Amino acid sequence: MERRGLDFVALNQGNAQLTELYRTHIGDWPKFYKMDTLSKAGFVATELLLKKVGECRCSSEEFIRSRAIVLFGSTASLCADRNYQETIQDKDNYYPSPALFVYTLPNIVTGEIAIRNHWRGETSFYVLEEPDASQMAFHLACAFQDGDTESILAGWVDSRMNDDFQVFVTLVSREDAADTEWLAGQLQLMINNLNK
Amino acid sequence: MEELILKLKQEIIEVLNLEDIKPEDIDNDAPLFGEGLGLDSIDALELIVLMEKNYGIKLQDPAKGKEIFKSINVMADYIQKNRTR
């Protein structure tokens, strides 16, 4: 019997579209408005994925401790870095923004998702030159080696400018990651969806 | 004072990205932190920056923010008495 493919959500619209998706499908997390584009993209895609697969947030202690988040991107927090730099560029108008500064690390997006869902497993953000299904599958398989991780919210999230982003997220089980070739094939299908 | 209060509310909404909140939704006497608008520590730092940038008030002791940011009325009163621009 052929193995069922992984569910995923892929988005690559403008930032206004993210706000529209938030208002239409989520709407109960005002912190969304304070996030940078990278976090907004990761947050909204994750919310839509969890709705799609019907996963509820009322999970057991064991579950929330074993759910990891592993994301990949190519420009890390470059977009947030630029926004922050604008607040310190001019010495006569030098007002560093704390709210922009807190997003000048790419792994903040993993924290935003973890806080929303109360997940307490490992979180990491890898910077790759470009989406690479084999490398991503390898790192995901490695993440299960800690003995605690049982499932991973995984994906690609990248934002070059405020209205320019690409994201896909999926859920990977230990069994999925054990067959890295199959997992790489699934991730490649998702990568192919990034530009559609 | 009324004009300053309205301007202050508009500035807070903009700088803290309170997208779904209008000036009239903010009670002049309600606490800005905790129950009121539910602001956090990063928001407090942004308010300190706002006071310096827009009103020329430099808080030497950030701990004072706790008293100054008690409510819109308290904040506006402090700004009116200490502003340099």
Image (spheres, coloured by chain):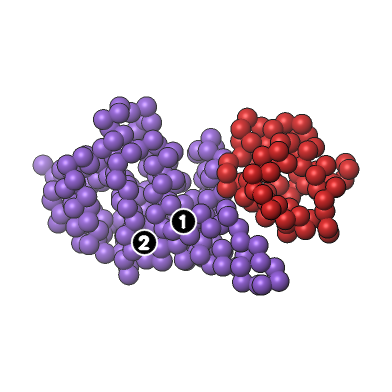
Chain colours: A purple, B red
Q: Which residue is denoted by mark 2 in the rendering?
A: A73
In primary-sequence order, the first of circles 1 and 2 is 1
- Residue drawn at x 72%, y 56% as measured from the top left: B58
Q: Taking the image as drawn, is residue B70 in sight? A: yes
A80 displayed left or right of B70: left
Picture quadrant where residue B65 is located:
top right
Same subunit, labels 1 and 2: the answer reads: yes
- Residue drawn at x 65%, y 48% as measured from the top left: B62
Give coordinates of residue A126: x percent, y percent: 32, 60
Name the kind of residue labelled 2 in the image: Gly
- Residue drawn at x 39%, y 42% as measured from the top left: A114
Label 1: element kind? helix
CA separation in Å, label 1 and label 2: 10 Å
The vertical placement of A2 against A65, above or below, is below
State if disc 2 and disc 1 touch (CB < 8 Å). Answer: yes
Picture quadrant where residue A97 is located:
bottom right
Give coordinates of residue B3: x percent, y percent: 87, 45
A109 displayed left or right of A189: right
